[in-house]
Image: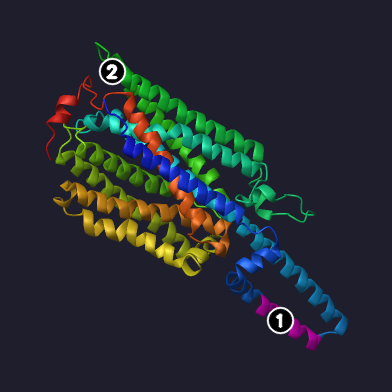
Amino acid sequence: MYTFSSRLKTFAFALIILGAIGIAIGFFTTPQTVDEYKAKYADTHATATNHAVSSEEHSTNTEVHSVANEHGSANEHGANNDHAKHDEHLLMQAQNRPWTALYIPAIFFLLVSLCALVFYAIQRASTAGWSPVLFRVMEGVTGYIVPGSIIVLILLIISSMHGNHLFAWMYTSIDPTAENYDYAMETKDWWLNIPFFLTRSVIYVLLWIGFRHFIIKTSRAEDKATDLKPYKKNFTLSVVFLIVFLVFELFLAFDWLMSIDHHWFSQLYPFYVFASMFVSAITVIAFVTIYLRAKGFLPKVTDSHIHDLGKYMFAFSIFWTYLWFAQFMLQWYANIPEETAYLVPRLLGEYQGLFIGMLIMNFVFPILILMNSDYKKVPWFIVMAGLVILAGHYIDIFVLVSPGTVGSNWHFGIPEIGALLFFLGLFIYAVFSALTKAPLHAEKNPFMKESEIFHY
C-alpha cells in the first residue's frame, strides 16, 4: 500500500496556501472604476485606445470640413459616448482577470484528470497487455475529477448569476430593439441560454463522477474476486464510458470553452481540446509513475513501460499538431471575417508570442526530443520533455480563454501564478490521496503477468 508522505502532503498544502493568497491579492487589487483602471493600466489603456482615438479624430476633422458646426458637435458628443463605452469595456476585461486566472487552471486540471480516465478506459476496452501494472496510477490521477468538477461547476454558476463577464453571451439579447442585441444569438439562443447551459453542465459533471465511481469500484472488486465477472463488467463499463465521453465531450468543449467567443465556431474545436488534454494526461501519468517507481512503490514497472508512455506522448503531440493545422489552415486560407476575427488577436495581436511559443513547445520540441526511441526509456528525459509539454498545453488553454475574457489586459502575474499554484496543490493532494485507497499492484488482473514481463 502506498502511503502519502508527509513531505509531499506539506508541499501540496503549501502550494494551496500560497495560491490562495495570490488569488485573494488578484481580487483585492481589481479596479472597481474606470479611473482606477486608467491609473493601474495607464500604458495598456493608452495602447488599447490609441487606434480608436486616431480614427475618431480623423472622422471628426473630416466632418468639420464637410458639414455644419452643429453636426460636428453632435459627432463629438457621440465620440465621447463611444469612448466612455470603450472604457467601461476595458474595465470589465480588467475585472475579468482574477476570474480568468481561476477558470484556466480549474478547466486544465479537471480535463487532465478526465482524460486520464479516458486513457484508462481505453486500456480496459482494448484489453491491453502492457499497461495493467500502471492501472492504479491511472486510477489515482482520476482522483481529481470529483473536486475539480465541483469547482468548475461553482465557477459556472457564479458566471450564470452575473458574478463575472467570462461568457459574453450571458449578457446579450435577441430583441433587435434592445441595447445589448446580438445578431449571432438569434440562431444560438436555443442552446446558449443560462438554464439549459447549467443543466448540461450538471449532466457532464454527474456523468464523469458517476462513471469514475463505478469503474474504480469494479476495479477494486477484482482484487477480491475469484472469477472474471468484475473484469468483464469493467470492460463493459469502459466501452460505454468511451462512447458517452465521445458524445458529451463535444458539447462540453463547445459550452465551457468555445462559447467564450460565441461569435466564432469550429467543428474541429472539441477534438483539438481533447488532443491537448489527452497528451497532458498521459504526461501526468508518466510523471506519477516515475515518481512512485523512484520511491520503490512500483517494482514491476520497467523502462519498457516508461518507453510506451513516451511513445503516447510523442504520438498525441503529433495528433494535436495535425488538428491545430487543420483548424488553423482552413480558416486562414478561407479568410472569412467571422472566422479570422478569432485568429487576429492570437496570431497577429497581443497573444502572438504565446501562440507561436505554445506551437513550438507542443510540436517542435516533442518532435526533436521524443523521436529517438532510446531517449524515451530515460526517466529524467521523459520528465524534462513532459514539463515543456505540460507548460505548452497550459499556455494553449490560456490562449483559448484569455482573448475572449480579458482581451489585451492579459498578464501572467500574481493572480495567474497564485491560481496555478492553488490548483496544482489541490491536484497533487487529490491524486496522491486516491493512490492510498488500494494496493498499487492490481494482481488479480488477468493480463498482469503479461504486463510484468512486457519488454519493448
Disc 2 or 1, which lies upstream in sequence?
Answer: 1
- Which disc, if any, is residue 222? 2
**Do we see residue 17 in this rendering?**
yes
Decide: few, some or many residues near mark 2? Use Cα within 10 Å; few <14, some 14-19, many ≥20: many
**In front of the other: 224 or 22:** 22
Amino acid at dot 2 = Glu
Residue farthest toward the top in the current orientation of the protein: 226
Distance, label 2 to label 1, CA atoms, is: 74 Å
Say which residue appears at 51% left-offset and 68% top-offset: 349
Residue 447 image-quadrant placement: top left
Decide: few, some or many residues near mark 1? Use Cα within 10 Å; few <14, some 14-19, many ≥20: some
Across and down, in percent, residue 423 comes to 45, 44
**In front of the other: 288 or 276:** 288
Element marked by disc 2:
helix
Position of 287 compared to 130: left or right?
Answer: right
Magenta stretch: give its range.
53-66
Residue holding disc 1 = 57
